[in-house]
Amino acid sequence: MAKVHPLLFWLGCMLMSTAQAQTPPLFVGADLKLGESLIKTHNCAGCHGRHMNGPGDDIYNPKGKINTPGALRGMVDLCANQLNLQFFPEEVTAVAAVLNRDFYRFTAKP
């Protein structure tokens, strides 16, 4: 196994802890790869595009009624239930965490 310079190890740890510190507690530890996969598999942007009569990303409006991490997770849960996707709670959280990362950018409260 290759040795890692202590300074590089420390810097990596600091970067990871900074990102985690900015993540809302609801999304800390969420499986982002799973969320990305679910969004792609279920063609979320395509369905949203049909509802918005345009690009599916238009529905992700950070200045709209979704104004907290909990509201975002709740909307993902509502969508999944309406479409009978049978997501487990951790899958709902994973999708919401990806949407937060890519569109909403909610951060942890100081």
Image (cartoon, rainbow, N blue to C red):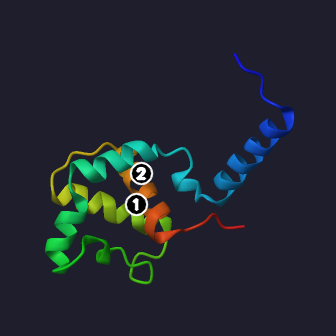
Q: Amino acid at mark 2?
A: Thr
Which image quarter holds the N terminus?
A: top right
- Residue 86, given in percent of the width and then of the height, sits at 21, 45
Q: Which mark is residue 110?
A: none
Q: Is 91 drawn above or below residue 5 in the view shown?
A: below
Q: Nearer the viewer, residue 25 or 39?
A: 39
Asked if marks 1 and 2 touch (Cβ < 8 Å), the reply is: yes
Farthest bottom residue? Answer: 63
Which image quarter holds the C terminus?
A: bottom right
Of mark 1 and mark 2, the one earlier in the sequence is: 1
Q: Amino acid at mark 1?
A: Arg
Q: Nearer the viewer, residue 72 or 99?
A: 99
**Quadrant assignment, res 12:** top right
- What residue is rendered at 85% in x and 33% in y? 6
Q: Is residue 66 left or right of residue 25?
A: left
Say what secondary structure mark 2 lies in: helix
- What residue is rendered at 19% in x and 49% in y? 85
Real-space Cα separation, disc 1 to disc 2, in angstroms: 6 Å
Instruction: Return the residue at label 2.
Output: 93
**Quadrant assignment, res 7:** top right
- Residue 37, given in percent of the width and then of the height, sits at 32, 45
- What residue is rendered at 45% in x and 47% in y? 32
Farthest right residue? Answer: 7
Q: Nearer the viewer, residue 55 or 95?
A: 55
Instruction: Return the residue at label 1.
Output: 73
Say what secondary structure mark 1 lies in: helix
- What residue is rendered at 41% in x and 66% in y? 72
Q: Is 51 drawn above or below residue 91 in the view shown?
A: below
Q: Is residue 36 left or right of residue 50?
A: right
- Residue 105, given in percent of the width and then of the height, sits at 53, 68
